[in-house]
Amino acid sequence: MTDRFQKGSRMSQAVVHGGTVYIAGQVAANRKGSIEGQTQDVLDQIEALLKEAGSDKSKLLAVNIFLPSIADFDAMNGVYDQWIDKANPPVRACVEARLADPDLRVEMTAVAAA
């Protein structure tokens, strides 16, 4: 069985299939915010989607982070490190990549156990 959450015409924000939650790329609602503000917004969105899908951040398996400027790496990590479940850290990748909107400072995808 597959469950889809916050479905749109192009994509769902989260999909649960086979006991795994897949979270689509999340970006900040406030595109003019600082890297810290945008990072917190994205993590809050991920946490809300995990909850809606019946999971939580302690069940994260993987997080992929995209930064248009790798110079934001330390500032992003300052927020991420406070948010992540330190007893259950997921695997993670962080790459420098151009995002769809030049005001975006971070985008994240996630995979978690349901």
Image: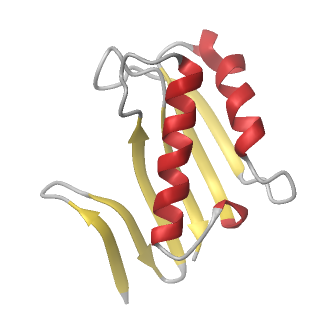
The quadrant the N terminus occupies is bottom left
Q: Residue at x 51, y 16 (%)?
A: 34
Q: Residue at x 53, y 12 (%)?
A: 69
Q: Is residue 3 left or right of residue 108?
A: left
User: How are the residues colored?
Assistant: secondary structure
Res 6 quadrant in image: bottom left
x and y percent of residue 55 in the render? 58, 72
Q: Quadrant of residue 59?
A: bottom right
* Number of numbered markers: 0
The residue located at (51%, 52%) in the rendering is 46
Q: Residue furthest top?
A: 71
Task: Identify the image quadrant of the C terminus.
Answer: bottom right
| Residue 90, percent from left and from top | 72, 54
- For residue 73, above or below residue 55: above
Of residue 87 and residue 69, the one placed in the foreground of this image is 87
Query: Between residues 58 and 93, which one lies in front from this camera angle?
Result: 58
Q: Is residue 69 above or below residue 47?
A: above
**Residue at 71% over, 28% down:** 77
Q: Measured along the vertical axis of the image, is residue 54 above or below residue 111?
A: below
Q: Is residue 17 left or right of residue 110?
A: left
* Image position, residue 95 (x, y; %): 57, 27
As drawn, the residue found furthest toward the left would be: 9
> In the orientation shown, which residue stands out farthest toward the bottom?
1
Question: Where residue 111 sits: x, y (%)?
Answer: 55, 60
